[in-house]
Image: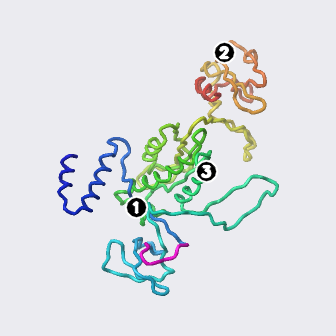
Amino acid sequence: MAAINDLIGQIQDENLRNRIQEEVNKMAKQKKFGLVFEEHMPESTSLYDMPIKRGCNVMRRDSKNDKSIYVVLKVEGDTAVCVKSEQKDETVTFDLKDIVRIAEFGESIYPYLKPLDSVCNAPDSDLWHTLIEADNYHALQLLEYLYAGKVDCIYIDPPYNTGAKDWKYNNDYVDGSDAYRHSKWLSFMQRRLKLAKKLLNPADSVLIVTIDEKEYLHLGCLLEEMFPEANIQMVSTLTARSGAARFNSFSRINEYIFFVMIGEYKITPIEEADYSKEGEKIHWRSFRRGNPANIRTSRPSQFYALYVNKVTNLIEKVGEPITPDIDRFSVPQLDGCIAVFPVRDDGTEMLWGGYTKYMQKLSK
């Protein structure tokens, strides 16, 4: 670094010298290990309600082929004379209705909520919901003013960066041939996750992010880096039992969900529910094993009582494993609770799906 700084000092142009020195200083602070990506990728936001004036930046409103940024030189009636920001010698004239004013990332934007409509479904209820239609980054910025540290759950379904030209970024489409497609996507996500983290309740909250195989590895690393204090788990979710066929690749039947669990969270089982198609009850499969071979005697350490509170339906205590020679009805009772065992409808004693240590954690 000393040699580089000496060479920079030889640059005659002061502005250029200072800019290069600033960038080199940023590079020197970057981490040597972990997820490394370009964090300065440009991003712009359309400001549809803002008037177009001399000196402001604009883009073509509906064109998919031209995502260039133009600078307005002058406005004449219903037209604007513009020039590309990187080409100052060639002007082009647009109708005002065909262009929109933009703000590049980092420029000051002061978002506000403009009521458009309302629906009252339950006039006698105190419950209410708000649907905000906006650029997600600036919507998160706006929510931060009132709800920083107060949000219990955030669900994010981001662009999957498949290269299918289905989302706009950096004034262009991020496709499979873009050498910086992963950096652009990570930069896009990092900016929004920073705001989401400010909104989440640090004492008890969860962030849920869906993704597929294109970016799940990068997303996992990014979440680990940004939420070091959280318990992060990725699970699979079935999307198509028949599979999505792809040329010269395995068919895909699933996607992934990241759960970023912060503070004093608790995962509780869902209650049994009627399955309307067949009229039978579905059990929470992570609790009781369903394989006929998983009977009580096959693994005695996984047969014990779960003491469920009669009022709250929460697990208050996990009993000790019961050996096969002991009748389950002889176990001690707990006031206000029901002792629950993994027993089939026909009376067959089965096994719990989790080990005792895991169940103990669940009950705390």
Give, as a single range, the part of the protein colored magenta: 49-57
Residue where numbered disc 1 is placed: 42
Residue at the right extreme? Answer: 124
Residue at the spot x=41%, y=77% of the render? Answer: 72
Q: Quadrant of residue 43?
A: bottom left
Residue where numbered disc 2 is placed: 324
Callout 2 amino acid = Pro
Cα distance in 3D space between marks 3 and 2: 54 Å
- Mark 3 residue crowding within 10 angstroms, few (<14) / some (14–19) / many (20+): some
- Residue 27 lies, in percent from the top left, at 30, 49
Residue 147: which numbered mark, if any? Answer: 3
- Residue 251 lies, in percent from the top left, at 48, 50
- Residue 260 lies, in percent from the top left, at 54, 42
Q: Are marks 3 and 2 in contact (CB under 8 Å)?
A: no
Task: Return the disc, 3 or 2, that comes first in the chain's sequence.
Answer: 3
Please tell me which residue lies in front, 138 or 187.
138
Position of residue 349 relative to residue 53, above or below, is above
**Disc 1, SS:** loop
Position of residue 64 relative to residue 36, above or below, is below
- Mark 2 residue crowding within 10 angstroms, few (<14) / some (14–19) / many (20+): some
| Front of the two marks 1 and 3 | 3
**Disc 2, SS:** loop
Cα distance in 3D space between marks 1 and 2: 66 Å
| Residue 51 within the magenta-colored segment of the rendering | yes
Callout 1 amino acid = Pro
Is any part of residue 293 visible from this angle? no
Q: Quadrant of residue 117?
A: bottom right
| Front of the two marks 3 and 2 | 3
Callout 3 amino acid = Tyr
Please tell me which residue lies in front, 352 or 126.
126
Task: Return the disc, 1 or 2, that comes first in the chain's sequence.
Answer: 1
